[in-house]
Image (cartoon, rainbow, N blue to C red):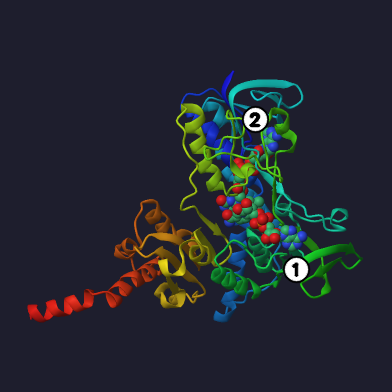
């Protein structure tokens, strides 16, 4: 009898397996594919960031023509993907089954499903038993029911990182994080990209002002259609004919290849959750309480499978909390307070907490302050000719940060200071009091947080008092 059975060897499952066994629990980790690491390593974060980095290098190299460099020619995508795969292989070593076996974890390969709430079938014939079961089976690409799509070849995040030929004309369906990141990467590698989003905006949950700016920047490199549906796809000798419909008209487009990035679906179908009484929502996500427990309290659902926040760092946070709850019996809440994420477009888009719209709705306009700086006011970005972007911080009247958003080169890194401040319950003023080595990019945070003091100085009684004091001191 295991103390814990973990189903799924991705970001969430590996965190639990390593954490639980290091506390001395008897752990089994079951993985359906041949390798540990999950989506993030094999088809997600790692290959996409490797691809984005190469695409950005190509874009930067092309810019050097204006300094007299002779940069021309086409990209060999097979070679690009070789480098992408080599990034995966290097990180894979960290997720080697041997490492987990050495930690005391029994690693079993095969698809898992529930027989009872404590008995798990692995592959065709093996059965194991555990006091607690953590389901961390992740998610897969959702393929929308578009007429003609299933009859043609298309790419998803599970296949695209093995592409061998750069498409001349590429359609990307879906303007979420995957769609935005991959569209820009392929546009920079040399494809003519059309990005189609059926919703009103790209990155739908974002702060409206930043969504507008990201869209504007992407539109410089590709065609973007929002509020547009793909109605039908057919093929001819020349390519794929895409029938599109926006709010007023229908029109067609011809492309060579299609990437589908239209959302995710949880991997719960084959688990027999229904058979053991684990409740799921209408899309199949495991319904959990604030400790990550399902409707059967000894069964947990963490990572993409619970449909909360589809990020590796969410899976990690949930995994750590569940180790404490399931192994030590000390309930630890999953906490999404001050949860940040980054869309790795260039420039990067950082988001944390409330947007301006949601803050106004929640607290009322009169109860919040908005502090904004444009990157064309920050020396480093000016020096580098990379002034496209903005920092926006939203606070309560007392300076408590309730939202932080940024678009800018490297924003994902330099906005981490704000994450730390929020987690340490520091107000916006304390960000202004730090020393920022000149001219680092985090200077954009300083510039924005300085606005808080400036406002206090000019709108409060402080200047009147200091004036009087200086007169007296003279
Ligand atoms: C293109 C792309 C880019 C991304 N970029 C980022 C990023 O930059 N930053 C970020 O934070 N997040 C990113 N994500 C999201 C991130 O990849 C996921 O949030 C993360 O992988 C979720 O981890 P998980 O453990 O829940 O699932 P996974 O990592 O998918 O792991 C689930 C594992 O369970 C296994 N499994 C499934 N069913 C069974 C079964 N029945 N029995 C046994 N094993 C099973 C699977 O084979 C898999 O190994 C990206 C995702 C994609 C698709
Ligand atoms: N940088 C990152 O952290 C990062 C990067 C990539 C992915 N991810 C994770 O992966 C997941 C995002 O995946 P995604 O971008 O596929 O999903 P998503 O749900 O974020 O976006 C999918 C988009 O496709 C649109 N769509 C759906 N059907 C459509 C259709 N028929 N025609 C046109 N548009 C259509 C939806 O309106 C939606 O905006 C999230 O969990 C995200 O957190 C994170």
Q: Secondary structure at mark 1?
A: loop
Quadrant location of the C terminus? bottom left
How many numbered tags mark residues here? 2
Q: Give the vertical position of 403 relative to 8 (above or below).
A: below
Q: Mark number for residue 30? A: 2
* Sooner in the amino-acid sequence: mark 2 or mark 1: 2
Considering depth in this image, is 347 or 133 the residue closer to the camera? 133
In the rendered structure, the answer to whether residue 69 lies left or right of residue 114 reads left
The percent position of residue 444, horizontal first and vertical second, equals 41, 69
Query: CB at mark 2 closer than 8 A to ligand 1?
Result: yes
Disc 2 packing (10 Å; few <14; some 14–19; many ≥20): many
Residue under the image location 64 percent in, 39 percent down: 286
The percent position of residue 120, horizontal first and vertical second, equals 68, 25
Considering depth in this image, is 406 or 80 the residue closer to the camera? 406
Q: Nearer the viewer, mark 2 or mark 1?
A: 1
Q: Pointers 2 and 1 in contact (CB under 8 A)?
A: no
The percent position of residue 21, horizontal first and vertical second, equals 50, 27
Q: Residue furthest top?
A: 1
Kindly tell me whether residue 306 is visible in this rendering.
Answer: yes
Considering depth in this image, is 147 or 349 the residue closer to the camera? 147
Which residue is disc 1 drawn over? 228
Q: Give the vertical position of 213 relative to 349 (above or below).
A: below
Q: Which picture quadrant has residue 9?
A: top right
Considering depth in this image, is 426 or 94 the residue closer to the camera? 426
**CA distance for labels 2 and 1:** 41 Å
Kindly tell me whether residue 88 is visible in this rendering.
Answer: no
In the rendered structure, the answer to whether residue 131 lies left or right of residue 146 reads left
Query: CB at mark 1 closer than 8 A to ligand 2?
Result: yes
Residue under the image location 69 percent in, 21 percent down: 127
């Amino acid at each position: 009898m295991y103390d814990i059975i973990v189903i799924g060897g991705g970001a969430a499952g590996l965190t639990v397996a390593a954490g639980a066994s290091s506390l001395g629990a008897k752990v089994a980790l079951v993985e359906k594919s041949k390798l540990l690491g999950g989506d993030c390593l094999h088809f997600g974060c790692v290959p996409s960031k490797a691809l984005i980095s190469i695409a950005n290098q190509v874009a930067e190299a092309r810019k050097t023509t204006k300094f007299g460099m002779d940069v021309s020619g086409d990209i060999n995508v097979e070679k690009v993907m070789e480098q992408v795969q080599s990034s995966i292989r290097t990180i894979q070593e960290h997720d080697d089954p041997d490492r987990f076996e050495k930690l005391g974890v029994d690693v079993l390969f095969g698809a898992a499903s529930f027989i009872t709430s404590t008995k798990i079938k692995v592959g065709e014939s093996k059965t194991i038993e555990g006091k607690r079961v953590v389901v961390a089976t992740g998610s897969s690409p959702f393929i929308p029911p578009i007429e003609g799509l299933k009859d043609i070849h298309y790419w998803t995040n599970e296949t695209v990182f093995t592409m061998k030929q750069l498409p001349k004309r590429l359609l990307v369906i879906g303007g979420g994080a995957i769609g935005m990141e991959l569209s820009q990467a392929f546009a920079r590698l040399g494809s003519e990209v059309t990005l189609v989003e059926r919703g009103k905006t790209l990155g739908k949950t974002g702060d409206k002002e930043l969504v507008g700016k990201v869209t504007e920047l992407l539109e410089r490199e590709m065609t973007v259609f929002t509020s547009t549906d793909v109605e039908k796809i057919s093929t001819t000798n020349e390519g794929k004919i895409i029938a599109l419909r926006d709010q007023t008209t229908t029109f067609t487009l011809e492309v060579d290849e299609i990437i589908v990035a239209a959302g995710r679906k949880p991997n719960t179908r084959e688990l027999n959750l229904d058979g053991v009484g684990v409740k799921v929502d209408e899309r199949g996500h495991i319904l959990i309480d604030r400790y990550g427990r399902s409707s059967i309290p000894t069964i947990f659902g963490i990572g993409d499978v619970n449909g909360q926040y589809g990020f590796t760092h969410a899976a990690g946070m949930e995994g750590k909390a569940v180790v404490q709850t399931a192994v030590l019996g000390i309930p630890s809440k999953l906490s999404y307070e001050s949860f940040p994420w980054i869309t790795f477009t260039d420039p990067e888009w950082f988001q944390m907490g409330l947007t301006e719209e949601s803050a106004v709705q929640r607290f009322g306009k009169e109860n919040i302050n908005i502090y904004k700086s444009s990157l064309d006011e920050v020396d480093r970005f000016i020096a580098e000719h990379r002034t496209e972007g903005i920092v926006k911080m939203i606070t309560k009247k007392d300076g408590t940060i309730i939202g932080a958003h940024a678009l800018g080169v490297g924003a994902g890194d330099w906005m981490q200071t704000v994450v730390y401040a929020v987690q340490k319950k520091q107000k916006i003023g304390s960000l202004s009091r730090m020393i920022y080595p000149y001219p680092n990019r985090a200077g954009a945070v300083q510039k924005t947080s300085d606005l808080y003091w400036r406002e206090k100085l000019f709108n409060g009684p402080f200047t009147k008092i200091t004036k009087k004091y200086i007169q007296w001191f003279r």
